[in-house]
């Protein structure tokens, strides 16, 4: 079993720590030496959301000496269904501030290192290099490839987890005995093909299962016991309560961990995943050359000016019931092809969804079908509720 510590000197345990961790210490696989390893360990958790919540809470409870947290977001109401490190009084607070208070309450003996800001190619090697184990609690592809590549370059094991609707995955990457994330997923999916949890939803208890598995793997790596998920991809189906396992191997041709790596420094991961920031909309366009997107500010100005626009909501019925723009016609994406005859090709159609992803696809389809004035609301109703009408609920 690969151990991350080498010959690091282990700290002693206080009388209080011997009592606090007694149920660990009486395990032969842990013992007092193992608990001292945990106290000496430095583990980084990237993200304090759905996965980062159980990961950080269990690592703090286990007595990890230094726990690093990376985040730059604030707590919102829709987080509370699954991000259990945060509570209702924390809404509006920075997630790092909220998580620190909760983790201090769980175990004040753990040193918390807070990294406020996004992880990127400019800071990843510096931040990740300070830790023995890195736990990936992120929810997007650029961050996953960034963390993987940095861990390979630094020689740090990465504990991977991912969640989607009722499904989850977990593994351990970037170790000498197994593959890295790129070996399993050489290329990211096309932008927009895989909806985010905000678009598709996520079962509230799911990150608890996957996050707990990640915490388990991180602790095993520190202790040097058992068999980790290195070389295995664990797949969990919460609806059937079914686990299955795939054997995954290191790819000798992998551009990062292969025999002759071609990626030797961190790259632009937003560009690699096709998610670079969109160009700003032109201030002026020629007559008849409507841009594909419209901003919420422009739409508000035009509605206030009394212009004739047809609003089309392509979200699901349950989303429409939560919040919608007045006067919008609801045609969910799955019904658009069958119901497109309900729309007038001569009208300027403003298509909107939650974040502007589905609506952009819908607008492109409608233009292909002859609706030349079909446009997508950039940022969707979420942008509208945050930048135009703050009285509208968000989800």
Image (tube, rainbow, N blue to C red):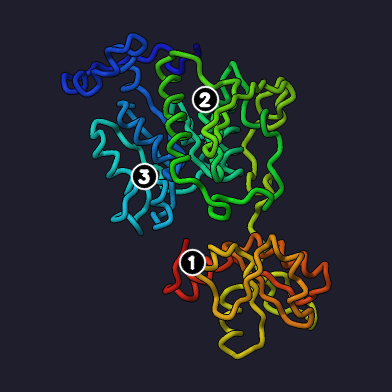
- The residue pinned by badge 3 equals 84
CA separation in Å, label 1 and label 2: 42 Å
Tell which circle, 2 or 3, labels the residue nearer the N-terminal end: 3
Q: Residue 336 location in percent, x, y? A: 72, 66
Nearer to me, 378 or 207:
207
Q: Which of marks 2 and 3 is in front?
A: 3
Residue 182 location (% of width, % of height): 66, 31
Between 101 and 269, the one lying in front of the other is 101
Percent x, y for residue 59?
36, 30
Q: Is residue 171 visible?
A: yes
- Residue 322 badge: 1
Dot 2 lies on which element? loop
Question: Mark 1 or mark 3, which is nearer to you?
Answer: 1
Q: Name which of mark 1 and mark 3 comes first in the sequence.
A: 3
Q: Mark number for residue 157?
A: 2
Q: Which residue is at a point 52% across and 25% down the rendered structure image?
A: 157
Q: Is residue 51 left or right of residue 22?
A: right
């Amino acid at each position: 079993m690969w151990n991350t510590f080498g010959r690091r000197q282990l700290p002693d345990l206080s009388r209080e720590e011997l009592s606090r961790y007694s149920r660990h210490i009486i395990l032969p696989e842990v013992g007092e030496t193992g608990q001292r390893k945990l106290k000496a360990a430095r583990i980084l958790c990237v993200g304090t959301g759905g996965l980062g919540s159980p990961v950080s809470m269990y690592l703090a409870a286990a007595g990890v000496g230094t726990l690093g947290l990376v985040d730059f977001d604030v707590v919102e109401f829709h987080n509370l269904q699954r991000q259990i490190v945060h509570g209702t009084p924390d809404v509006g607070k920075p997630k790092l501030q909220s998580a620190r208070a909760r983790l201090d309450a769980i175990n004040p003996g753990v040193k918390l290192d807070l990294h406020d800001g996004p992880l990127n190619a400019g800071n990843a090697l510096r931040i990740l290099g300070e830790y023995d184990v890195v736990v990936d609690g992120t929810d997007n592809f650029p961050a996953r490839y960034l963390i993987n590549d940095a861990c390979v370059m630094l020689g740090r094991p990465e504990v991977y987890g991912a969640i989607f609707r009722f499904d989850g995955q977990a593994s351990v990457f970037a170790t000498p005995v197994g593959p890295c994330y790129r070996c399993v997923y050489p290329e990211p999916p096309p932008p927009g093909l895989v909806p985010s949890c905000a678009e598709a939803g996520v079962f509230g208890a799911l990150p608890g299962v996957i996050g707990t598995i990640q915490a388990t793997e991180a602790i095993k790596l520190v202790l040097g016991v058992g068999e980790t998920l290195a070389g295995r991809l664990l797949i969990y189906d919460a609806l059937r309560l079914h686990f299955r396992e795939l054997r995954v191997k290191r790819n000798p041709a992998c551009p990062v961990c292969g025999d002759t790596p071609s990626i030797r420094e961190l790259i632009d991961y937003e560009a690699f995943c096709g998610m670079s920031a969109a160009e700003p909309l032109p201030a002026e366009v020629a007559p008849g050359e409507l841009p594909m997107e419209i901003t919420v500010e422009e739409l508000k100005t035009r509605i206030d000016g009394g212009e004739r626009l047809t609003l089309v909501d392509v979200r699901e019925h349950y989303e429409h019931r939560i919040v919608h723009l007045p006067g919008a016609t609801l045609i969910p994406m799955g019904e658009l092809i069958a119901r497109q005859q309900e729309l007038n090709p001569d009208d300027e159609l403003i298509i909107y969804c939650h974040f502007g992803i589905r609506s952009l696809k819908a607008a492109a389809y409608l233009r292909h079908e002859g609706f030349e004035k079909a446009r997508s609301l950039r940022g969707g109703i979420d942008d509208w509720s945050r930048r135009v009408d703050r009285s509208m609920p968000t989800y």
